[in-house]
Structures are given as C-alpha cells and as structure tokens.
Image (cartoon, helix red, strand yellow):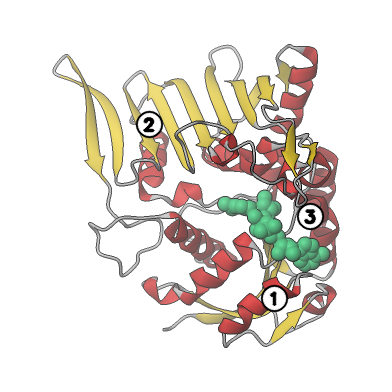
Amino acid sequence: MTGAAVDVGIVGGGLMGRELAAAIGRWAALEDHPVRPRLAAVCDTDPQVLSWFDRIDTVRLRTADYSELLADDGLDVLYLAVPHHLHERLYLDAVAAGKDFLGEKPFGIDLPAARRIVAAIEAREGLFVRCSSEMPYFPGAQLAYSDVRSGAVGPVIEARSSFLHSSDLDVRKRINWKRQSRFCGRAGVMADLGMHVLHVPLRLGWCPSSVYAVLQNLVPERPDASGALVPCDTIDNATLHCAVGAGGGFPLTLETKRIAPGEMNTWQLRALGMDGGVEFSTAAPKTVRRFRVRGGRQVWETLEVGSQSAFRTVTGGIFEFGFSDAILQMWAAFLAERAGALAGAFGCVTPREALTSHEVFDAALRSAETGRAEAV
Ligand SMILES: NC(=O)c1ccc[n+]([C@@H]2O[C@H](COP(=O)([O-])OP(=O)(O)OC[C@H]3O[C@@H](n4cnc5c(N)ncnc54)[C@H](O)[C@@H]3O)[C@@H](O)[C@H]2O)c1
C-alpha cells in the first residue's frame, strides 16, 4: 500500500473506538488513498475494553490515562470517542496539546460547552479537527446529496432528514449513560443522533432559522444493574419542524428517535422541489428513489446505487454497502482532507457545523418550554 503513514490514537475504545480499529484493519480496501493510518495507541479507563485491543499488533501503547496520548509526539491523529460529559475537558486538552482529531458528536454536552470547544479550536492555528458523522457516506446518500446540490430538483418545496432507532422499545432494557442527561446532555436523543440528521442539510446550506419542537420522554424509568428502576431523564424522540430561509423559505423536518417502531438504524433523507425530488433510506441501502415529471407524467423511479461512495474501493460496483463501509469512508475523508487531498469529495462535519447543531438543539429545548417556534 502506498500513501503517507499516519499514527492514530484512540481515546475511548468502546463501541465506536472498536469501529475505527476495524476500519483501519480494512484500509487496504481503499484504492489510491493518499494516507496509510496505523493504530498505535489506545486509552480507556476500563481494563477489559483495553484488552480487546490486544488483537491488534500495531498498538504499542495501552493506557487508562489519556494525557499519555496527548504527550506522545509519535501520534499524528486522535479519535475521541467518550461519553458526552467528558467531551469538553478532553477536546480542550487535545487542542492545548496541538493534536489533530476527529471528535465524536455532539462535540460537548451542551451549547456552552460546544462554544468553548469550537472557540479553542479556531484560536489554535493549523489544527485539523472534524466531528464524526458517517451515514452521509452511503452511496445513496451521496447520490441524493449530489442530486439536490446540482439543482436537479429545482427550488426546494420541503425536506426531511431522519435518524430512527427502535432499540428502546424494550422498556426492560438496562439504563446506560446515554439515557441519563447528566452524562448524555439535556438534548437527549438530539445529542445522540442530531448531528447525523444535520450534516447533509447544513452542507446544502439549509441552516434552520427557527424551530418548533415536539420532544418526548417516552420511558421515564429504566432498570439499573441491580434491576431497580431509576430515572431515565432523557428525551427519547425529537421531531423538529424547522424553517429554512426567510420569506420564500421551506420547511425542513428533522427527526431523531430512539423509539420508532420497526426501524433499527434507519437514516433517511427526502427532498422535494419544483423540478423533481429524491429520497434515500438506509432501510433500502441499494436504491435511491427519484421523482421527475416526464412527458407530462409524474414518475418515481428507482436507481440501483451499488457499493461505490466518496472514495473508490476494491469492492465490486454491484455489491452492497453497510455501516462499517460508511465508517471507512468517513475516515478516508477525514485523513484525505487533513492531507490536503479531499479533491472535491464529501468532507466530514466541521467544528462550526457541530456548533450549529447545538444551536438547533438549544432552540428545540427552548421551543419545548415555550410551546412556540424559537429562533436558532
Ligand atoms: N458516529 C456514530 O455513529 C456513533 C455511534 C455511537 C456513539 N457515538 C458517539 O461516540 C462517543 C462514544 O460512544 P460509544 O457508543 O462508543 O460509547 P461507549 O460507552 O461504548 O464507549 C465509551 C468508552 O469510553 C471509555 N471512557 C470513559 N471515560 C474515559 C476516560 N476518562 N478516558 C478514556 N476512556 C474513557 C469507556 O470506558 C468506554 O469504553 C459518544 O460521543 C457518542 O455520541 C457515535
């Protein structure tokens, strides 16, 4: 494999830390990528989590203290994937240490934390930082994005961007940090899934000017490890009715749900315009639906999209694409952009976009209190 070598360190080797380790293991699937990452260090406070990384030969440092990674001059890039209440301290420390990083969303537990993180990043010249959001790298999402961006749908009438889970339908599911606002944030499900539904809209210039929010805490208690019921005080489902642009603008509906019966990890985008429309859902990852008027007839057509995304891979063009492919593509974009070689491909979420997502969540929380639409 060619490409410049980049040593990567992970802080937080849980669900997402392991996804990155697996993506680096499959890096050879990328054709002609300008960077060759190697997983060199892992930090996690849980020894069992750390021991999972024994299977990766290139890891030379395992520690429970992230300051060892920050002080390690041999590490070029960090992936920060810890619970939300730890984002601010860790991200600020990484900035102070001059480390480039991909930080997990939501980029701070709330709006003030996100403001401090983004201000520190912007004050530190030359630092390359992005926020995680992989679902737009599904080939169907890329096609839908390009279709809208090219102007093919014409002036937008309305749009919807959704991320829908159903894991919390089981009310006996044990509580975890994501279901407690002191660790997850008051924004609840928006903190978990909101960046995913805003990445493409923000890239299309669809920044909400106001939000009317319907927020639901559908399961207010869950069992802890002992089986005792404890408060589960986070928002489970959030439906945000947003206005994009003044006057001649359009409605953008943002849905983030932990309890959407029938959906597992369904990311959807739909846009309708005066000249056409497009919709993509990861529930049908092989296809994109496109609307056009032809010969006076209204036509919804189905396009097969295959496996190829922003960065070319060895995978056969007709094969299917999945979550782990999206993670690989997001990291390909992050490392290519850091190397100055994005070459027009779809880039990862910028710190400013992560901050904007918090501004939208904050307006949604205010709207739920006032019962009115609130300015972003
Ligand atoms: N991009 C995505 O699709 C996606 C999916 C899930 C979660 N996330 C985000 O990733 C982040 C982590 O979520 P997760 O699901 O991987 O959580 P997780 O609980 O599976 O993993 C977090 C890890 O951080 C470790 N940790 C806690 N405190 C630490 C510290 N001080 N130093 C080092 N390690 C510490 C924990 O031991 C745990 O192993 C969150 O910001 C979450 O929103 C993103």
Near-viewer residue (232 or 310): 232
Near-viewer residue (146 or 285): 285
Residue at screen point 60% across, 49% down: 349
* Left or right placement of residue 71 versus residue 310 in this view: right
Q: Which residue is mark 1?
A: 50
Q: Which residue is mark 3?
A: 87
Q: Give SS at disc 1.
A: helix
In percent of width and height, residue 71 lies at: 82, 79
Q: Which residue is mark 2?
A: 151
* Left or right placement of residue 102 versus residue 121 in this view: left
- Going by the numbered disc 2, the residue's amino acid type is Gly
Residue at screen point 40% across, 46% down: 142
From what the image shows, is residue 291 above or below residue 85? above
Whether the residue carrying mark 3 lies under 8 Å from ligand 1 is answered with yes
Q: 10 Å neighbourhood of mark 1: few (<14), some, or many (≥20)? A: some
Q: Give SS at disc 2.
A: loop
Q: Earlier in the sequence, mark 2 or mark 1?
A: 1
